Amino acid sequence: MSAPLILTNVDNHFSSLGSEFYSLVRPQSLSNTHLIQANPALAQQLGIPADQLSSSSFISSFSGQQCPDNFQPLAMKYAGHQFGVYNPELGDGRGLLLAQLRDKHHQSWDIHLKGAGQTPYSRFADGRAVLRSSIREYLGGEALHHLGIASTRSLALFGSDTPVQRETEEQAALLVRVSQSHVRFGSFEWFHYTHRPQLVKKLADYVIDLHHQDLPQDESRYPLFLQRVAEKTAEMIAAWQSVGFTHGVMNTDNMSILGDTFDYGPYGFMDDYQPDFVCNHSDHQGRYAFNQQPGIGLWNLNALAHSLSSLISTEDINTALSRYEPHIKHCYATELSAKLGLAKPHDDDVMIAAQWLALLEKEHADYTRSFRALSQFDPQLPSEQQTLRNQFVDRQAFDQWAEAYRQRLAFETQDQQARQTLMNRHNPKYVLRNYLAQKAIELAEQQDYSEIDRLMTLLVNPYDEHPEYESYAQVPPDSAKGIALSCSS
């Protein structure tokens, strides 16, 4: 076994909080661990030489085979509301916070190994992650990041020969997840519901001192902190809605305290526009459907606020949370206006957007392709000459909306080229459709990782044309639409 990689920018500050917050655990290595994919741009940001990513020392250090001496692997303890029901028996059951690094800007980054084996919080599970879910999280994090949406990312994806049993026998894998923080809403819930307000305060001070250093040093910092969490959560969910992304499992233990997309499970980008789209086949009631996400965000924030009630008065909680609804509406409306090419605000914008979405829903139109094609709308041409019109069965309904849209565009001061540029910066041509991810998974299970490479090319630049990959932007076959996935990983 090679010597571990030597990193001088390690700063394991979370461990200073004390043993009430975590358990020290050594990773359990896999058989024949090998690198499938690494992220050189992220490595460079973390101060890890890109030329080291394929080295045996990198694989040994970051797969948990032989952790460097200054790493301090630990499993974090937290609780959470799962599908609306409080569950105290949670924590890192298959992942470990390997270390925390400081980049050249002194920004702290968590290095988390997912699939590292059993911990005190595994609840009789094997503590492993399977290849399919690891690939999906690796791709999903990069997809959202390059769409400009706050998200965790991954430094590396490792495969192995270790078998794991799920519905069938699968291959164990490891994912090195990178985030500014792994503190969740449920981290605060754990200490609140075990009646330890001093630890709620200790955790809140830790997060504020690390990520909100501009907040006051007095008691006013706590309601301001809650307000910021509400605003960041609103911005994240509004961004999800704008690209047709459904998280699938918005439990409070899956909600980042920083407003990052966190814990990728059965997520999905919509194909046909379907507001009640459910991507998780375990979600029988549609609690986490696409159109429920804004409301669930507020529900989760209320759960967080309750866990902070030893620090914040009811009045201040209500004030902080009152920022959520107007902020998410503003963020979503702003994004929709850009997607429609409307740079100059107008009273009709909300109506134009709502009618467009209603038309897409009625026609079962592809969400991503329809918005992308709208940039070709020429207000100088009559409706029947618009290329986009051919995608709609109800041509009369399209004509009515197109006339309203044409009239709205008359208020714009930008020319058509500027409008198209704006729209193509906000309407991706390529998104990580479930059937594309599934194809990459099936090939990877045969040790063919080429499709992961191809998808990464598109996901890193989702707004570009990529004519050689035009088929990846086409409407999927009917058999591939609306795929629902399980939480099993």
Image: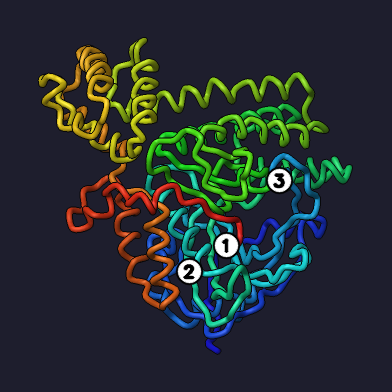
Marks 2/1 in contact by CB < 8 Å: the verdict is: no
Residue named by callout 2? 157
* Left or right relative to 124: residue 163: left
Point out residue 92 in the picture as x, y percentages from the top left corner.
Answer: 70, 60
Residue named by callout 3? 82
Residue named by callout 1? 111
* Left or right relative to 271: residue 102: right
Q: CA distance from mark 1 to mark 3?
A: 25 Å
> Residue at horizontal 33%, vertical 31%?
363
- The disc, 1 or 3, on the residue closer to the chain's N-terminal end is 3
Q: Quadrant of residue 345?
A: top left
Is residue 106 in view?
A: no
> Residue at horizontal 41%, vertical 64%?
39
Q: What amino acid is at disc 2? A: Leu
Label 1 sits on a secondary structure element that is strand
Q: What amino acid is at disc 1? A: Ile
Label 2 sits on a secondary structure element that is strand
